[in-house]
Image (spheres, rainbow, N blue to C red):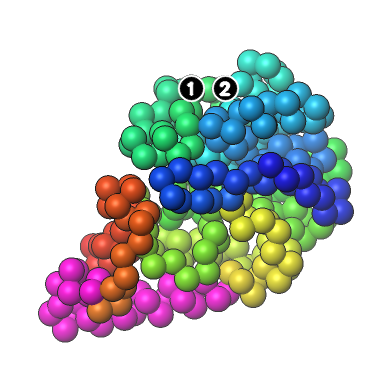
Amino acid sequence: MEIKSYDNLLQAELNVTRGGQRLLVSVFLIDNLLIDTGPSRKEDYLIPLFEKWDMHHVILTHHHEDHTGLANWLQHNKQVEIFMHESGIEQCIKEAKLPLYRHLFWGKRESFKAIPLDETFQTENYTWDIIHTPGHANDHIALYNREKGWLFGGDLFVNPKPKSFFKFESVPEIIHSLRKVLAYDFDTYICSHAGVIFEGKGAIKKKLDYLISKQQEVLFLYNKGLSPKQIRKQLFPRRHPMHYFSLFENSPMHFIYSVIR
């Protein structure tokens, strides 16, 4: 785990590996607000850190286990209020039933009770706009810090040119969410996996342009009569170990299906 700081933002960046796959994931502390909790598989690193950090509130960008894995621990040991979008609350009341590969990679996510977010959230020094940004998850949000002009985007960005999607993701919804956040005045973008991106608005625009372009290519080939499998072979021919590790819950086919359905 590496602790980074930028202005008055603290970032705890963790390196998670399993089955030959390596991913970075971060949690952030600013103005006594913790954004996401990280995965339970890294509790040996995160719990000692959380015991030191002075936090008054927790906001979760969405319900996935790499962002909520220690919410239960925080609720019972730090007695802090945990907030998230209302559409994710019910599925967090029960312990998550995860596919095996996600359980092995990130660890379990025990149940917890969250409070629904309003359209804005107030910390001591900052006002935060809460922006509903579905596409990666139904309850996904981004947080815009009005005073600093920073955008915390959860998993909205991650990769500027994704060639593979999870079964639960939607290209059209992500395009809509990217357009939504681009209406805000920001340059610094804080990503849960890519970290702090100083030319963040440009990065978001590049991802939006890429997704629109690929969406158009998929639709063009589909309207020509090509099958989803034929489209995959033409646009996304390479296989990635993650496809096999996830038993194809992560696959270019889900990119295509989300466009044509």
Give percent across and percent down for residue 256. 28, 66
Q: Which residue is mark 2?
A: 72
Is residue 253 rendered to the left or right of residue 193? Answer: left
Residue at left offset 68%, top offset 26%:
47
Report the quarter where the C terminus lies. bottom left
Which region is colored magenta? Answer: 205-233
Residue at the image position 63 percent from the left and 15 percent from the top: 76
- 69 or 169, which lies in front? 69
CB-based contact (under 8 Å), mark 1 and mark 2: yes
User: Number of labelled discs?
Assistant: 2
Residue type at numbered disc 2: Asn
In the image, residue 18 lies at what x, y percent?
45, 43
Q: Earlier in the sequence, mark 1 or mark 2?
A: 2
Q: Could you say where residue 218 lies in the image, as x and y percent from the top left?
A: 28, 76
Residue 157 rendering spot, x and y as whole percentages: 55, 61
Look at mark 1 in the image and give the residue it sits on: 111
Residue 243: image tag: none
Left or right of residue 214: residue 69: right
Q: Is residue 256 visible?
A: yes
Q: Label 1 is placed on what type of residue?
A: Ser
What residue is rendered at 45% in x and 39% in y?
105
**Is residue 218 found inside the magenta-colored segment of the image?**
yes
Establish if 208 lies above or below 54: below
The N terminus - image quarter: top right
The stretch drawn in magenta includes residue 183:
no
Would residue 63 be seen by someone viewing this image from the given angle?
A: no
Q: CA distance from mark 1 to mark 2?
A: 6 Å
Residue most toward the front?
20
